[in-house]
Amino acid sequence: MKEVYNLDTLPDINLPIRCFTCNKTLGNMEFRWLEEMKTIDSENPDKNKIIMERLGLKLDCCRKEVLQYMENIFRK
């Protein structure tokens, strides 16, 4: 049986499930990031750094993946 997907209803997933370098799980970071953004003052210039520390993103490889994805979302 052939499955047909409506491309308008599928989520646009760009964030990888795991980090390519260290294999840390990143798939759930989008929702946690958005929750943390609500608690931080939007005027704070270091808000991305604070959010990454709260989410436990310590390695540069994970920070790069998540930050690229989140900047891409807010640019749209």
Image (spheres, helix red, strand yellow):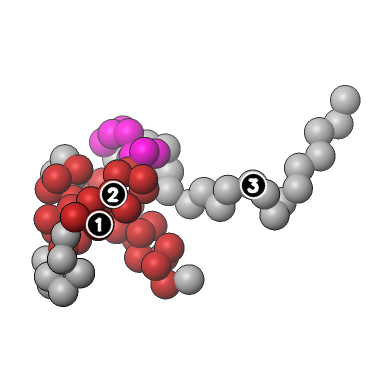
Q: What whole-number distance in Å separates the C-alpha atoms at marks 1 and 2?
A: 5 Å
Label 3: element kind: loop
Amino acid type of the residue tagged 2 in the rendering: Glu
Question: Outermost residue, right direction?
Answer: 1
Among numbered discs 2 and 3, the one appearing first in the sequence: 3
Q: Are marks 1 and 3 in contact (CB under 8 Å)?
A: no
Q: What residue does disc 1 label?
A: 38
| Secondary structure found at label 2 | helix
Q: Return the residue at label 2.
A: 35
Q: Are marks 1 and 2 in contact (CB under 8 Å)?
A: yes
User: Where in the figure is residue 11, as x and y percent of width and height?
Assistant: 58, 48
Answer with the quarter of the image where residue 55 lies. top left
* Quarter-of-image position of residue 18: top left
Residue 67 or 44: which is nearer the viewer?
44
The residue at the point 71 percent across, 51 percent down is: 7
Q: What stretch is highlighted in magenta?
A: 22-28
Q: Residue at x 12, y 55 (%)?
A: 50
Q: Relative to the observer, which residue lies in front, 57 or 37?
A: 37
Q: Which secondary structure class fits the magenta region best?
A: loop
Q: Residues within 10 Å of mark 2 (few under 14, many from 20)?
A: few
Tell me the kind of residue under disc 3. Leu
Q: Name the residue under label 3.
A: 10
